[in-house]
Amino acid sequence: MSYNKALNNPIFKIIAQASKELNIDSYVIGGFVRDFILERDFKKDIDVVAVGSGIDLALKVSELLPNKPKVQVFKNYGTAMLRYKEIDIEFVGARKESYTQDSRNPVVENGSLEDDQNRRDFTINALAFSLNEKDYGTLVDPFNGLEDIKNKIIKTPLNPDITYSDDPLRMMRAIRFATQLKFEIESESLSAIERNKERIKIISGERIVDELNKILSTDKPSIGFLHLYQTGLLEIILPELTALNNVEEVEGHTHKNNFYHTLEVVDNICPNTEDVWLRWAALLHDIGKAPTKRFSPKQGWTFHGHEFLGGKMAKKIFERLHMPLNHKMKFVQKMVMMSSRPIVLAQDIVTDSAVRRLVFDAGEDVDDLMTLCEADITTKNPSKFKKYHNNFNIVRKKIVEVEERDHVRQFQPPISGEEIMALFGLKPSREIGMLKEAVKEAILEGDIPNEYQAAYDFVIAKAKKMGLKVTK
Ligand code: ATP
């Protein structure tokens, strides 16, 4: 069967022409072929393998293109890349790889197309379309990848123990593809991952996180996290999460399994957001529960302070996995630390002042915090489920009302410290701090509106009680 239809982008004819002029064979390989067969969205990234020099082929292709795009050459890797109409095209010479025990960087030699397909991670990623005159558009499929796509199976071309041990990142990739594509991982492969799990330790945090982010960006990340858990990888990468997987019983009291609960929360958040950081917040929102868990006959199971500890643990995880320690980390930490606040609200009568305080503390992130907390409702009791959601709707409405009236989301004191100092002829001091704090509290409590005149009158009255005299 010919796949000419897949190759209707004019760039393929040009690559074919360039290969012909250089007298080498070339193929489109990997994700492009897989995604075409799967009828998945085209992902603007094409991999071309040349049986010869990938760099020479890229240079020739650029020469044949009207605008002669710049070719980025990565000499050390024997690869080159150019951009054609927003599409990145990567050229690589067909290669044969052999691995050593302590590194995922192989020793590389030139090889045939077959050698190159052998080194690919999965049968579904080893498929190639020919760009050669003699069989243009033919699928080259030595490992029955097409069949595996139809059967929705992730499987390695060679012995999985060798494939995973050679480059342990492939274990994460297998699980990531299974999650993205909703494919099964072949059972031989799954047990090979289990056997080789310790090898993940040679992979950098950045690469592991890349894969975790891709899993977290799917519509059902729990598929991936369950695989990570069952293969033992999660215990190595995020032991803070696996520590949540238990249920204890004392005197007939149990608590919920916070690991499975967490996965439900992460899944719940997915349809509503593109933001991977909110999903990280969902993933980590209960990690403080394992170390804070206590039982007392009076209160049953408690997790006092788990939010605060969880926030601190989140930062440590970011550090350990070499994740960004910038505002993204701060956001995740803040979400974890505040993750119970709206819940407490939603269980009670929702007062304006409680909502005002919530908006003040969460600031610009208050909507994300609400999304996280709504996702956190995993109760299987329909009446409780309904009640909590109704209350959250009330909280959301009140957030809008309170914000329109009081503008506390980006709180600016209506009367400045300088003005208060000038009024009483004081330098920065404890009294000034107390007056500023009192103004803020009065606004959050709803005693005065967030307006200049009201704040001015309030300061004068409060200062009088403190024995201060207006000097101005
Ligand atoms: P996506 O872009 O969705 O991640 P992709 O398959 O294009 O999918 P890339 O990471 O761009 O993924 O890799 C391109 C191709 O290179 C893969 O299809 C696969 O053939 C090969 N490949 C990538 N990483 C590895 C690896 N660690 N081991 C073996 N082959 C790999």
Image (cartoon, grey):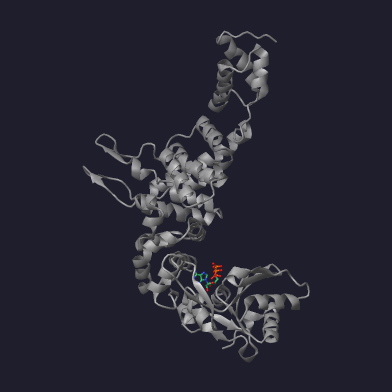
The spot of residue 254 in percent (x, y) is: 27, 46
Residue 47, located in which quarter of the rendered image? bottom right
The spot of residue 436 in percent (x, y) is: 59, 21
The spot of residue 63 in percent (x, y) is: 75, 77
Quadrant of the drawing holding the N terminus = bottom right
Residue at position x 50%, y 81% from top?
115
Above or below — where is 149 with respect to 361? Answer: below
Q: Is residue 306 visible?
A: yes
Q: Is residue 89 visible?
A: no
- On screen, residue 138 versus residue 221, left or right, reads right
Of residues 121 and 162, the one nearer the viewer is 162
Residue at position x 52%, y 35% from top?
358
The spot of residue 212 in percent (x, y) is: 48, 58
Of residues 356 and 40, the one nearer the viewer is 40
- On screen, residue 3 versus residue 106, left or right, reads right
Quadrant of the drawing holding the C terminus = top right
Seen as rendered, the residue at the extreme bottom is: 134
Counting labels gives 0
- On screen, residue 27 versus residue 174, left or right, reads right
Residue 160, located in which quarter of the rendered image? bottom left
Residue 401, located in which quarter of the rendered image? top right
Of residues 356 and 311, the one nearer the viewer is 311
